[in-house]
Image (cartoon, rainbow, N blue to C red):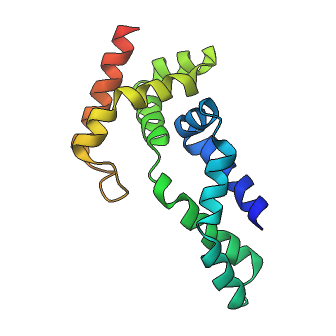
């Protein structure tokens, strides 16, 4: 179960938090991070097994707990704004094969806005945050 959870968590990170993925790889910390996260929910896993929950339920509840602090995804948030509001830039970057790299750069450029407005599931729809991030994207694209 633990190995499967590590694999699923890593897959989630690769698709939704590539900035974290790159940082973990750069620091040679992937294995340590995954082991720490999965070890941190051993109590939950044991409790669910003791309650005779089916495997798929245990997996789903454990994954929910594992990704809790990875939500919402700054990567997906910026990607969505870029794709919907900067369509030509999005296509150009996507075709160049640099989409992930550029979005990770945009996450770094947007940290002030994320910190100012906070970035949680509760305020993900905050229009002021949206405008601040869109403005950062615009400045970034103009500087290229």
Choose between 139 and 41: the one closer to the eye: 41
In the depicted structure, whether residue 116 falls above or below residue 108: below
Q: Is residue 50 left or right of residue 140?
A: right
From the top left corner, tell me how far across and down residue 137 is, in percent.
35, 24
Q: Residue furthest top?
A: 144
Choose between 36 and 96: the one closer to the eye: 36
From the top left corner, tell me how far across and down residue 64 is, in percent.
57, 66
Residue plotted at (73% across, 74% down): 56
Q: Is residue 86 left or right of residue 40?
A: left
Residue plotted at (49% across, 52% down): 70
In the depicted structure, whether residue 114 falls above or below residue 96: below
Q: Is residue 124 left or right of residue 104?
A: left
From the top left corner, tell me how far across and down residue 92 is, in percent.
54, 15
In the depicted structure, whether residue 77 falls above or below residue 96: below
Picture quadrant where residue 16 is located? top right
Residue plotted at (57% across, 61% down): 66
The quadrant of the image that shows the N terminus is: bottom right
């Amino acid at each position: 179960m633990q190995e499967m959870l590590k694999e699923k968590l890593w897959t989630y990170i690769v698709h939704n938090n590539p900035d974290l993925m790159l940082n973990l790889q750069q620091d040679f910390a992937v294995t340590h991070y995954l082991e720490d996260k999965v070890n941190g929910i051993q109590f939950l896993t044991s409790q669910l097994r003791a309650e005779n929950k089916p495997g798929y339920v245990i997996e789903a509840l454990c994954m929910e707990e594992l990704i809790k602090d990875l939500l919402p995804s700054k990567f997906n948030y910026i990607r969505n704004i870029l794709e919907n509001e900067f369509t030509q830039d999005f296509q150009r970057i996507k075709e160049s094969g640099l989409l992930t790299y550029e979005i990770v750069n945009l996450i770094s450029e947007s940290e002030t806005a994320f910190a100012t407005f906070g970035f949680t599931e509760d305020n993900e729809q905050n229009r002021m945050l949206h405008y601040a991030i869109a403005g950062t994207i615009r400045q970034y694209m103009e500087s290229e």
